[in-house]
Image (cartoon, rainbow, N blue to C red):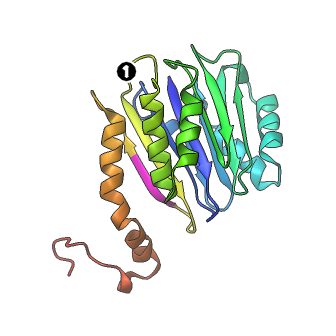
Amino acid sequence: MTFAVLASDASGAVGMAVASSSPAVAARCVHLRPGVGGAASQNVTDPRLGPALLDALEEGREPAEAMAAVVAAAPHSGFRQLMVTDLDGGTASFSGEGTLGVHAAAEGTRVVSAGNLLADDGVPAAVVAAFEATGGDLEERLMVAMEAGLAAGGEAGPVHSAGLSVARRVPWLETDLRVDWHDEDPVGELRRLLDRWLPERDAYVTRALDPSAAPSYGVPGNR
């Protein structure tokens, strides 16, 4: 019940955006590890598989090798839809025989997209094409890709939750935005959140690393 995009860029950033008809999709499906890569576990989701894929990357395996190892070892892997990327731009995807409804995956330059219960099997290809055609910060490229996926049909049913996360140079997620339930337009709400967040993103990293150099953004009592 999900479509998603997982990608990296030449700066060393890695990120993922996802949307679904079920609540709190990003909490279960998004797995990013700064300095290592990213992974997605979706469809009938097993959140343990994302960290397993990242562990395999950290051990030095290429994405395709990591995917094969995790799929072979995981119980019920036929129910899973998985993606993985390293920071060199390598990607891999897997859709088990139990993947729900219309499902597909597409890979491009530093990007992979996959979905299930789709309105059209061309949705992942549209997501990849939009990502590759967009410049700028990884957050913006992921957001544009998700908007393109929605415009291409998205899920067969209504979408209710969405999320977008990016890891970069610090050992936490620099961006971690979630719309856990929205009755009408979670992707649109995610766009609103991203536009609100991006101008302040770097300042919150500065607050952690060098608080004396960080702006207050007008928080009452902090001048």
Q: Nearer the viewer, residue 23 or 3?
A: 3
Could you tell me residue 164's position as x and y percent? 46, 46
Over which residues does the magenta segment extend?
173-177
Mark 1 surroundings within 10 Å by alpha-carbon count, few (fewer than 14), some (14 through 19), many (20 or more): some
Answer above or below: position of 206 versus 38: below
Q: Secondary structure at mark 1?
A: loop
Type of residue at label 1?
Pro
**Side of 194 where 19 appears, left or right:** right
Answer above or below: position of 123 versus 55: above
Q: Nearer the viewer, residue 217 or 47?
A: 217
Residue at far left of view: 220
Q: Which residue is label 1 attached to? A: 158
| Secondary structure mostly taken by the magenta-highlighted segment of the chain | strand
Residue at x 65% of width, y 25% of height: 80
Residue at x 52% of width, y 36% of height: 28
Could you tell me residue 124's position as x and y percent? 58, 31
Answer above or below: position of 137 versus 95: below
Residue at x 58% of width, y 20% of height: 121
Q: Nearer the viewer, residue 73 or 94?
A: 94
**Side of 123 where 178 appears, left or right:** left
| Any part of residue 201 in sight | yes
Q: Quadrant of residue 163?
A: top left
- Indicate whether residue 176 is drawn in magenta: yes
Number of marks in the rendered image: 1
